[in-house]
Image (cartoon, rainbow, N blue to C red):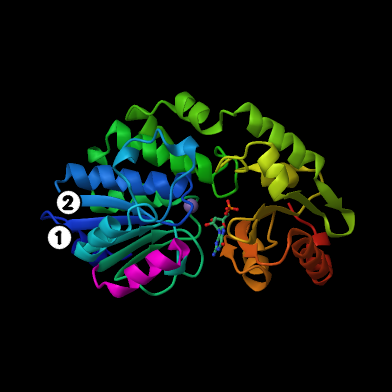
Amino acid sequence: MNSTDIQNIHSLLSKPKKIAIVPHRNPDGDAYGSSLALYLFLKEMKHDVQVVSPNEAPAFLNWLPGREDVVIFEEDKAYARKIIEEAEIIFTMDFNALHRVGEPMQKVLESVKPIYILIDHHPEPDDFADYTYSDTKVCSTCQMLYQFFEMLGVTDKITKDMATCLYTGILTDTGSFRFPSTTSKTHLIAADLLDRGVEHAKIYNRIYENSISRLHLLGRALENLKYLKKYKTAYITLSNSELHSFNFKKGDTEGFVNYALSLEDTVLAAIFIEDKQQGIVKISFRSIGDFSVNDLARKYFNGGGHINAAGGRSELSLKETIHRFTSVLPQYEEQLNKDHE
Ligand code: 5GP
Ligand code: MN
């Protein structure tokens, strides 16, 4: 994003406009945090603004400031469509291609001609936006939004509620400031957000506190963990009936894949979760070093993401999906066994 773009956006936002903000389907802390921080900011600037989310966020994000104002496309199609059709500006947050909102909402977004502004850190963004602020090196869209506010010269307008949303996305997308994408800039931003009143201990607890059924489900996931020494690969499976017997709620399996990655001598980790309702197996991949799970997910599992964190899906059964996974591993044997930090 160059200075002309910033000047243009600055003047675009200098008068009240109708604005919609869209996170990706199955929004995570970063997608919801960035959308809500931007929502609260634009509302404060007297714009007529709404967040339209393709579907519900997991319950552990329900306390985020502004959450109660979000319009859910899946639940309120006519109203959501009206907001999108009337919007003069649409911000797309934390995704790189319109299909990431799911087909029904994608169609609506493709049928309108607002000014699109994309803010995202996923690789290879599609060319649909009038203004594209994309940087794959930044840990989170929330950090990018903070930097966007810096470029606009408006960080002094960040309230405690906006800071809470931004901090949440940075926290969740960096695995609590652990992942290599965390930089000194990330910490400087976090420091500024704390100075604006963020209650970091409270946020951590709200995001990571567990229900007993989730802990029991985690127990089952860990029992199911398998390690393929030859490929330095660890993976977890959860079948539909296992999810049911542990009272599965949306968001419960978030982070499980990181336990597989934490196993010593693991370069590639995956979790396969059966979703009988959608008739798919949802997959999360994680890796360390320069092994790209983005490539693996794109090539074989209809997905994508980042080099070390990606997701995908399979329409095969759980068993067949695992078979497909293990049968593509041999071609990566050399890559998986070279030195990874
Ligand atoms: P997670 O495994 O936490 O669901 O997702 C990890 C990363 O991969 C996230 O950045 C997410 O946006 C991306 N991702 C997850 N599922 C998909 C998918 O089905 N398609 C694409 N293109 N990206 C995905
Ligand atoms: Mn993100």
Q: Nearer the viewer, residue 132 or 6?
A: 132
Residue 116 falls left or right of residue 267: left
Q: x and y percent of residue 194 in the render?
A: 38, 29
**Local crowd at mark 2 within 10 Å, few (<14), some, or many (≥20)?**
some
Q: x and y percent of residue 298 in the render?
A: 62, 70
Say whether residue 231 is visible.
yes
Q: Amino acid at mark 2?
A: Asp
> Where on the picture, by quarter, is residue 21?
bottom left
From the image, tell me which residue sits under label 2: 48
Residue 156 falls left or right of residue 200: left
In the image, residue 145 sits, relative to residue 67, either above or below, namely below
Q: Nearer the viewer, residue 191 or 291?
A: 291
Q: x and y percent of residue 221 in the render?
A: 74, 41
In the image, residue 222 sits, relative to residue 123, either above or below, namely above
From the image, tell me which residue sits under label 1: 11
**Residue at the left extreme?**
15
Q: Amino acid at mark 1?
A: Ser
Q: x and y percent of residue 121 in the render?
A: 46, 58
Residue 77 falls left or right of residue 277: left
The secondary element bearing badge 1 is classed as helix
Q: Is residue 108 magenta?
A: yes
**Local crowd at mark 1 within 10 Å, few (<14), some, or many (≥20)?**
few
Region rendered in magenta: 100-114
Q: Which mark is residue 116?
A: none
Mark 1 / mark 2, whichever is N-terminal: 1
The residue carrying mark 1 has its beta carbon less than 8 Å from ligand 2: no
